[in-house]
Amino acid sequence: MQKKALLVTGKAKSVYATDDDDRLVIHFRNDTSAFDGEKKEQLDRKGMVNNKFNAFIMQKLATAGIPTHFIDLLSDDEVLVKRMDMIPVECVVRNISAGSICRRLGVEEGLELNPPTFEFFLKNDTLHDPMINDYHIRAFGWASDEEVATMKALTFKVNDILKALFAEAGMLLVDYKLEFGRFHGEVTLGDEFSPDGCRLWDAQSRKKLDKDRFRQGLGGVVEAYEEVAQRLGIDLV
């Protein structure tokens, strides 16, 4: 598979065309940002860790019946994926209160949410990813009602799979975001699943093992990501 023109440069990944119109190459960079790009840093090894972490998770989900865009790990920091028509919506599930839900609703961090909450956000950094609902998605034509239902169902199925996976490794899956697209008409999981897009805590100490270490200036960001990978048995060598 030959990598060709650069198509998109995001905050932490770059997307390249290939000689197959149905395939793309994603390069995971060491760039790290928070607060819609206001805080930026280069963190050594981060691209490699997130790429291998994401490949491991995507393969676990595919084995469990979740359609994903993952095809193959190409190198330490590159992955081959399906080329999709992305839906500009983020699907967020929260199992424990943290982050924006605490600020918006005035609740304390660390409350178990039963049942887990589901929220939609518009993927738009300029607008700071505003919260939206099914009616907005329908009115603006971002996705059909059937696609919305599929995204919700898949997001909760992912929650069941990954909560159990992380629990076995002594961790709590606090919350996470997923993005979906269409591949030949099928709603398919895209983007990535890594500690950049979820919150993970040690089950006993509640030590933060995710991007909040960067957001909150706690340090040891990549080391925490590597600890999560090691607990899951991901080979980073």
Image (cartoon, rainbow, N blue to C red):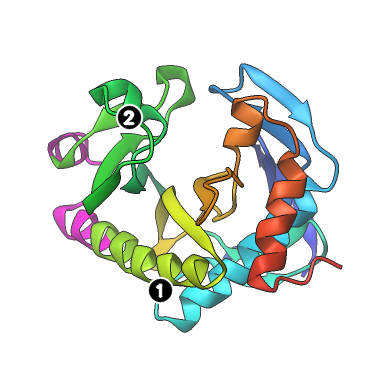
Q: Nearer the viewer, residue 223 or 158?
A: 223
Q: Answer yes or no: is residue 20 visible.
A: no
Residue drawn at 31 percent across, 65 percent down: 154
How far across and how far down the image is residue 75, in percent? 82, 65
Q: Nearer the viewer, residue 32 or 126?
A: 32
Principal secondary structure, stretch drawn in magenta: helix
Q: For the residues marked 1 and 2, what is the alpha-carbon distance in whole angstroms? A: 33 Å
Q: Is residue 31 above or below residue 79?
A: above
Q: Answer yes or no: is residue 51 visible.
A: yes
Quarter that holds the N terminus: bottom right
Assess disc 2: are there few (<14), some (14-19) or many (≥20) residues with their C-alpha within 10 Å of its C-alpha. few
How far across and how far down the image is residue 59, in percent? 57, 75
Quarter that holds the C terminus: bottom right
Disc 1 designates what residue? Answer: 66
Q: Is residue 71 above or below residue 207?
A: below
156 with respect to 98 (left or right): left
Q: Nearer the viewer, residue 220 or 27?
A: 220
What is the magenta range? 135-150
Disc 2 designates what residue? Answer: 108
Q: Is residue 145 above or below residue 119?
A: below
- Disc nearer the start of the sequence (1/2): 1
How far across and how far down the image is residue 207, in percent? 58, 44
> Residue 234: within the magenta?
no
Residue drawn at 74 percent across, 51 percent down: 27
Give the SS element for disc 1. Answer: loop
Q: Amino acid at mark 1?
A: Ile
